[in-house]
Image (cartoon, helix red, strand yellow):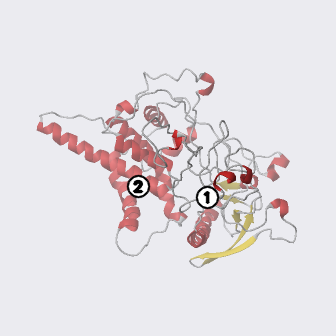
Amino acid sequence: MPPIGRNSPCPCLSGKKYKKCHGLISGKEDLFVPLVKNAPQSALVSLVGLPGYMNSYMLRSRFPPGDPRNDGGNDGLPGLYSITFVLSRPGTSLTDGFLHPGVSMLDGDSHLRIAKPKGKRQESDIQAVKIFSEYGPAKFEFTGYPNENGFLGKVEVEVEAANFDDARFGSWHAHHALATLLSTWSLRYDIPFVIAKTEITETRTGSMWHTLEQPFSPTNLASLSSASLPDSRPYTSLYREAVSTNSSTYQFLCLYKILESVRERRARLNSEAKLRGIQLNRPKEIFPSTEQEMNALLGDIFPHRDPQGWSEDTLRSLLLPELKGKKFNGIFDDLLRPIRNVLAHAILDEGELKYSPDSAKDQQEVIRYLPAVKCVVRSMLRSEFPDQFDISNLKPLPSLNDNYSSTKDVPAPAITNRANARSGRTA
């Protein structure tokens, strides 16, 4: 912790200078000071440990000599303790809620400063930076733009392409070239970089192709029931790992492991039942072939959602041609296992690294299957642990009225860029 200056405000939040408050008690900097009653619970502390990893520190209150509350020191004494868990959404969001503006409306952000803050930036100061990188024979000249605080927020590059499909193919190469450079900086400066959004604009027309990430829908608490039973806890905990990560590779591996474990669990239960002379009959698990079947499946595996809330676009996006009418076991063996082997072997096998998460092309297959894999996972978990999905007897908490119960699949609003907004056209 940096030294507390004698004329600095006292960390106890009394409003007095340190030299006239707790500086009088010890005559030197004191890391542990009492907080004034009813004052905001904050104090001056220094960051400890590596960025991005959980660490801890203690703020210990000190009282006048002889006060029994000083007993116990840092360890404390037997008694009542209050534990508070503060939650947050993984990472940060470029947008608020379900709004997905074009990149012209976004500043972007990172931990890498490339310019002065906008308010202090003069015309003679750096306004953008040129970044050079390559992927195979292709060489790219990127332009990096700072956000209002001066941190690298957006990176642009121009490519020649025959059409949007060709440009998208080119964007994979550009993505790999940029991601490779960002990975180098990540190691050099020990800071993270996330490419959160990609947009391709046809210069001639201003037409755009862009990526977006659909946010999770807010959901009301509908029960004060206890946690899952011991048999299902490994599955619920790994599922939370999957939905809480921003790594598509890690999420895929988590969901795959759940499927693999469910299959092993079923084999064990079948063997145990056979020894008792019992035949276990399970319903056939087949991926939907039509939008109606898909809607019915979603209603079963997401029972907390509004059954009328699934849009046609959502249903169609899940109905991948190679999955329609295919048995879950076939999906697992024929489609998912090969992907898992590539990911897991590249990371866990002995030898030099050959797989790079920087490659957008290599990630496409994983990203393509993830939504459908989640549906398969939830369907199989519902068969194994139906109580976790049964909300028939649950009622919303009394304090939550109908005005706060919507969890519909909200469609993204029309997106405009600044040029189109002026002309009244939507992109």
Identify the residue at horizontal 50%, vertical 65% (top origin): 357
Q: From this viewpoint, which residue is outermost toward the bottom? A: 137
Which of label 1 and label 2 is nearer to you?
Answer: 1
Residue 142 left/right relative to 404: right
- In the image, taking residue 44 as reference, residue 233 lies left or right, namely left
Number of numbered tags placed on the structure image: 2
For label 1, count other residues whose C-alpha is less than 10 Å away and answer few (under 14), some (14-19) or many (20+).
Answer: few
The image shows residue 95 at horizontal and vertical percentages of 68, 47
Nearer to the camera, 153 or 296: 153
Sequence-wise, the earlier of marks 1 and 2 is 1
| Amino acid beneath label 1 | Ser
Horizontal and vertical percent for residue 133?
63, 75
Q: CA distance from mark 1 to mark 2?
A: 36 Å
**Rendering coords of residue 411 (x, y %):** 63, 39
Q: Amino acid at mark 2?
A: Leu
Q: Relative to 407, is 236 above or below? A: below
Q: Can you say whether 347 is above or below 414 in the image?
A: below
Residue 253: image tag? 2
Q: Is residue 320 visible?
A: no
Query: Residue most toward the front?
Result: 66
Residue indicated by mark 1: 46
Q: Nearer the viewer, residue 360 or 331?
A: 360
